[in-house]
Amino acid sequence: MAHTPHALAEDFPEAADRIAALKAANAHFARLVEEYQEVNQAVHTAETLAQPTAEEHEAELRRKRMQLKDEIWKMLQEA
């Protein structure tokens, strides 16, 4: 299986324990992480041309990924 860049554990290695704890304790956070992983995988698939995607759709996926990452980071800071 190919490496997917921008995984949360890769981008926030110092927060790996907090991510795991929040996923277990907070259903909203767990859903955000799941959605982030799905969107991140879709971006990676588009970037590698494994599934060609319109540029506008790829840009929207990237914006969604950044929005989710920002929300996840904010919740990690508050935890």
Image: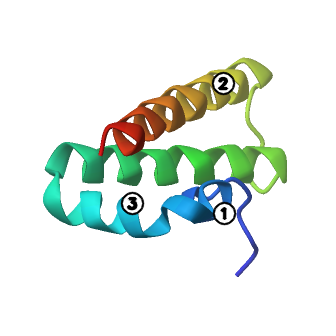
Residue 19, numbered label: 3
Q: Residue at x 79, y 23 (%)?
A: 55
- Is disc 3 surrounded by few (<14), some (14 to 19) or many (20+) residues within 10 Å? many
Q: Are marks 3 and 1 in contact (CB under 8 Å)?
A: no
Tell me which amino acid carries mark 3.
Answer: Ile
The quadrant where residue 43 appears: top right
Toward the viewer: 31 or 50?
A: 31
Toward the viewer: 40 or 13?
A: 13
Tell me which amino acid carries mark 2.
Answer: His
Q: Quadrant of the N terminus?
A: bottom right
Q: Residue at x 16, y 51 (%)?
A: 27
Residue under circle 2?
Answer: 57
Whole-number angstrom distance, CA of label 1 to CA of label 2: 25 Å
Residue under circle 1?
Answer: 10
Q: Residue at x 75, y 75 (%)?
A: 2
**Marked residue nearer the N-terminal end (3 or 1):** 1
**Marked residue nearer the N-terminal end (1 or 2):** 1
Tell me which amino acid carries mark 1.
Answer: Glu
Quick one: SS at disc 1? helix
Q: Is residue 75 left or right of residue 36?
A: left
